[in-house]
Amino acid sequence: MNQEELGVLSTRIDHTNELLQRMLAEVSKTPSTHAIFVDAGYLYAAAGRLVAGTEDRRSFDLDAEGLIDALIDKARTIFADSRLLRVYWYDGARRRIHTSEQQTIAELPDVKVRLGNLNANNQQKGVDSLIRSDLESLARHRAISDAALLGGDEDLVSAVEAAQGYGARVHLWGIEAPDGRNQAEPLLWEVDSQRTLELDFVKPYVARRTDTAYDPAAPRPAREDVRFVGAQIAATWLGARGRQSMVELLPGHPYLPGPVDQDLLVEAERLLQYSLRGQADLRRALRDGFWDHLQGQV
């Protein structure tokens, strides 16, 4: 190789080094990005058991907005030099129709609700695959460098592996267990770090529901009165939720999603000042009134 060729090669090397230095400088200016992935089924079960002593969602209230803000603040302290992409909230719903609670969560800033199905036994189906899909996609496109995963199911191992395969670090968060563990060991082995949210962190956002005491001597309401109350509640529900929610609910007739049915029961008991627990015929009348009003708006 003569001197002229060496000079050309040297110039090219210098140019390449300059480009690399520019690229490294740009990378150093680009902030890291993290996202929070919440398996709501795990969260409700673990938080309910820890604070309220039950995994039954109908037995306690969870301040999802307050807890999400707390999770965001926690991530901000852990990933100090990183920015939040968003919070992903994974839950189940019959026919993937948002409940009123899930719709409220979906309207929060920086939160995306993703729904799997809820079967007849109130078991989530398809949530793990949604988590894997999002984790893998975000890691593959370098949209996140760190993922905080709040969950405990062993089926999440493949989601962790997929994200790690593209260079993202996955940090497993869990809720303190009153006894033993509430997260699968293979999941604990696979993640890059582990963190437990203890009772003091969770307790402010969980409150056990107390049954209202009604006068046992109160007269039993007539079926038509209960039916009318069901229609009243439906009118209020429709005004708050809008026609689109009604259109999504109608294909499920005559069945109401569990949370909607529970809210209907609680509100009816408040209006009637009478307990409908164990009153199957009156519960049917209540639902009939609810459905009659909605179907009359079609």
Image (tube, helix red, strand yellow):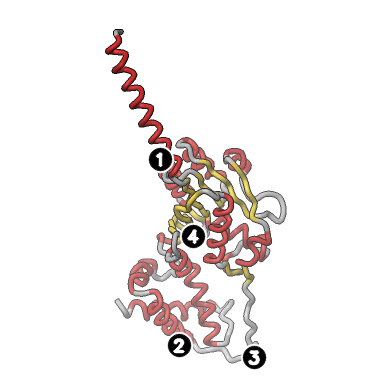
Q: Camera-side residue: 7 or 142?
A: 7
Q: Which residue is mark 4?
A: 120
Task: Return the residue found at the far right.
Answer: 179
> 251 above or below 190?
below
Q: Which residue is mark 2?
A: 224
Mark 4 or mark 3: which comes first in sequence? 4
Going by the numbered disc 3, the residue's amino acid type is: Ala
Image location (x, y in percent) of residue 200: 68, 62
Mark 3 or mark 2: which comes first in sequence? 3
Q: Which residue is mark 3?
A: 217
Cα separation between marks 2 and 1: 71 Å
In the picture, the disc for residue 26 is 1
**Label 1 element class:** helix
> 21 above or below 235?
above
Cα separation between marks 4 and 3: 36 Å
User: Where on the picture, by quarter, is residue 186?
Assistant: top right
Cα separation between marks 1 and 4: 52 Å
Residue for point 49% across, 72% down = 261
* Mark 3 vs 1: CB contact within 8 A: no
Pointer 3 local density, CA inside 10 Å: few below 14, some 14–19, many at least 20: few
Pointer 1 local density, CA inside 10 Å: few below 14, some 14–19, many at least 20: few
Image location (x, y in percent) of residue 232: 43, 84
**Label 3 element class:** loop
Disc nearest the viewer among 2 and 1: 1
Q: Camera-side residue: 93 or 204?
A: 204
Mark 1 or mark 4: which comes first in sequence? 1
- For the N terminus, the quadrant is top left
Residue for point 54% across, 41% down = 157
